[in-house]
Image (cartoon, rainbow, N blue to C red):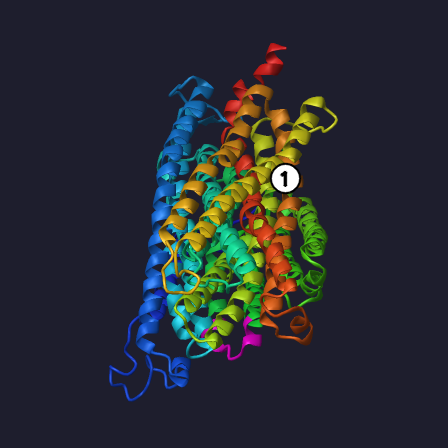
Amino acid sequence: MGATILPDLGTEILIPVCALIGIGFALVQWVIVSKVTVSIDSKSSGDGGKNNGYSEAFIEEEEGINDHSVVHKCAEIQNAISEGATSFLFTEYQYVGVFMVAFAILIFLFLGSVEGFSTKNQACTYDSSRMCKPALATAVFSTISFLLGAVTSVISGFLGMKIATYANVRTTLEARKGVGKAFIVAFRSGAVMGFLLAANGLLVLYIIINLFKLYYGDDWEGLFEAITGYGLGGSSMALFGRVGGGIYTKAADVGADLVGKVERNIPEDDPRNPAVIADNVGDNVGDIAGMGSDLFGSYAESSCAALVVASISSFGVNHEFTAMLYPLLISSVGILVCLLTTLFATDFFEVKAVKEIEPALKKQLVISTVLMTIGIALVSWIALPSTFTIFNFGIQKEVQSWQLFLCVGVGLWAGLIIGFVTEYYTSNAYSPVQDVADSCRTGAATNIIFGLALGYKSVIIPIFAIAISIFVSFSFAAMYGIAVAALGMLSTIATGLAIDAYGPISDNAGGIAEMAGMSHRIRERTDALDAAGNTTAAIGKGFAIGSAALVSLALFGAFVSRAGISTVDVLTPKVFIGLLVGAMLPYWFSAMTMKSVGSAALKMVEEVRRQFNTIPGLMEGTAKPDYANCVKISTDASIKEMIPPGALVMLTPLIVGILFGVETLSGVLAGSLVSGVQIAISASNTGGAWDNAKKYIEAGASEHARTLGPKGSDSHKAAVIGDTVGDPLKDTSGPSLNILIKLMAVESLVFAPFFATHGGLLFKIF
C-alpha cells in the first residue's frame, strides 16, 4: 500500500479538463467542416476563378455541367435526409421515453423494497461491522443515474446523427476537388461525433460521482453500487437505438436493392428509386445514432463494472480517491491520445489517392494503440499505489501496479488484433472477400455458402484474443482486471467512433452524388471512400463486440459477488438449465430482428414495385417518386418491430431472477455471453464480406474483378443478393447482440439486491 504520485486535487482537475478539451476539439472540427459552404460562391463571388478558396477546377467545370443546379440539388437531398432522420429519432425517442420512465419506476420499487422502504442505515454488504446508507437511498440514486445514463445515450446518438447529416453533402461537394478533400471532411465529421461522445460520457459520469458523494460521504460501497444505473440507462437506450435504427435502415436498403438493382437494373442510389431517401436516412439512424449509443453504453458499463469492484477493494475501503477513479483517468488520457492521433489523418499527412484511404484509417488504429500504451503506463505510474488489494470473490487479492497496467494493455492490444482480423475478413483488398466475389460466377447460392463459411472462420482469432485477455487480466487482478481490460479496449473510443462514423457519412455522400446527377468520376471517388468505410464499420463492430464480451464478464463477476454466490457450479441443475436457456437467447433475439427486417423489407419491396408500375414516366426520369411514403413505411415498421426484441432482453433477467433465483440467472448470463459473442462476430463479418464482394465487382479495379463485372451482369446480381441477405446480419442482428449480452449483465447487477432477497419464488414454493 502507499500514496499515489497524483494528488486527489490533481485528479479532480485532470478528468473534467480532459473532457472539456475533447468537447472543445470536437467543436473546432465542426467549425472547420462548416466552412465548406452548401451554396454557389465559386464564380459569383469574384474570387479570381478559385473555388471555395481552392485553386483546383471542379470536375463539373471540366465536363460542362451546371454547377449551380448540382449544388442546389445536393442541398435539397441533404435537407430531405436530415428531416427524415430527425423525424424518425423524435418518434423513436417518444416511445423509448415512455419505457424509460416506466423502467425507472420499476428500479425504484424493486430496490426500495429490499429493506421494506426503510430509511434507517443498514450493515454494509461486504463488511457487516460497518454501517451503510439504506437500501432506499440505493433505489433513489440508482433510478437517477439510470435516467442520466439514458439521457446521455440519447443525446450521444442524436448529436451523431445531426453531425452526419450536416457533413454528408459537404463530403460530396469536396469530392469535386479530389478524394483527399472529401476524405478529410468525412473524417473530421466522424471525429466530431467521436470526441463529443467520449467527452460527454466521461464528464457526466464524473459529475454524477461527485454529486452522489455529497450524500453518501464515506459509504463508497453504496455510492458506486448506485452508479451502476448509469450503465444500465446507457445500454437500454442503445438497444432500442440499434434495433430500431437497424430495422429502419435495412428495410429501406433491401427494398431499394432488390427492386432497383436486381429487377430494374438501375444504379444504387438512383433518384428514380423511391426507397433511396429512406435508405440514406437509415444509414444515419442505424449506423450513426444506434452505433453511438451502443459504444457509449459499452464505455459506461465497463467504467461502472470497474468502479463497483474497486469500491469493495482497498481503493474503496481506504478511500483512495485517485486510485478509485483510475478507470476515468484512463478514459481522460484516451481523449488526449485520440486528439493527437486525429491530427495524423487531418493535418500531418494528406490522403492524395484512392489507394491511400484505407491505410490512412488503419494507421489511426495503430497510432492510437501505440500512444495509448504509453498513456496507460503513465496513468498507472502516477495514479496507483505500488501495491494494493482487489476484491476477488470474498477475499482480497494483492496486486502490483504494473500488473494492472498489463491488464489494461492486453485489452487495448486485443482490440487492435480484433480490428485487423475483422479488416482481413471484410476488406476486398484480401483473398477472403475476393473468394466470395469469385463464387458469384456460379450464382447467389455459392456466394451465400462462401460468405457463411467466411463468417464462421472469422470468429476463431477474435475469440482466442478475448480468451487470452480474460486469462491474463483475471490472473493478475481478478474481475477488476477484466473490467479495466474492457476499458483498455475502449480507451481509444474517440478514434474508433471517428473511423466508424466516417463510413455512413461517405455512403450518404455517394448517394447524394448519384441523386444530384454529378459526374461519374465523383461517384467513383465517393464509392472508394464508402468501400473503405464498410471495412472500418466492420472494425468498429469488432471492437464493440470484443469489449462487450469483457464488459459482460466483469459485470457478471460483480453480479455474482453482489448476489452472494460463492461458486457458479454448472453441474447444478439450477445453473445448467440457465446455461442452456442463456445460450438459446441470442438465437431467439436474432430470429426476431431478422424477421422484423424481412417483414419491413417486404412492405418496402411492394411499395417500390407499386410506384414503378403505377407512376407514368418514373423509369424514364420524367416523374418524381413518392419518397415520403417509403420513409413512412420504414419508420412505422421499425418502431413497431423494435419492441418485442427489446422486451425479450429487458424482461429476461427480471423473470429469471424473480422466479428462479440468482443461481439460474448466473447460468443465463454465462450462456448468453458465450453464444452471443460468437454469433455477433460471425454475423457482422459475413454481412461485411458480402457487401464488399459486391463493391469489388462494381469497382472493377483489378483484372479479376473485371472478369466478374460489369454492373448488371449475372455475377453482379448474385453479389447484390448476397449483400441483401447480409444487410440485416451486419447492421441489425450482429451489432444488437453485443448490447444483449451487456444489458442483461448490467441489469442483473442493478437488481442483484432484490433478486438475492426475494428471488427464486418457484424453488421456494417447490
The answer to which quarter of the image holds residue 673 is: top right
Nearest the eye: 363 or 340: 363
Residue 424 picture location, percent across and down: 66, 63
Q: Mark 1 packing: few (<14 Cα in 10 Å), some, or many (20+)?
A: many
Residue at 35% over, 70% down: 32
Residue 61 picture location, percent across and down: 37, 83
Residue 704 picture location, percent across and down: 69, 72
Nearest the eye: 612 or 409: 612
| Residue 518 higher or lower than 672, as above or below | below
Residue at 45% over, 23% down: 110
- Which residue appears farthest toward the top when viewing the image? 765
Residue type at tag 1: Leu
Name the residue that disc number 1 marks: 673
What's the magenta region?
345-357
Residue 581 picture location, percent across and down: 65, 30
Nearest the eye: 727 or 265: 265
Is residue 328 covered in magenta? Answer: no
| Quarter of the figure with the C terminus | top right
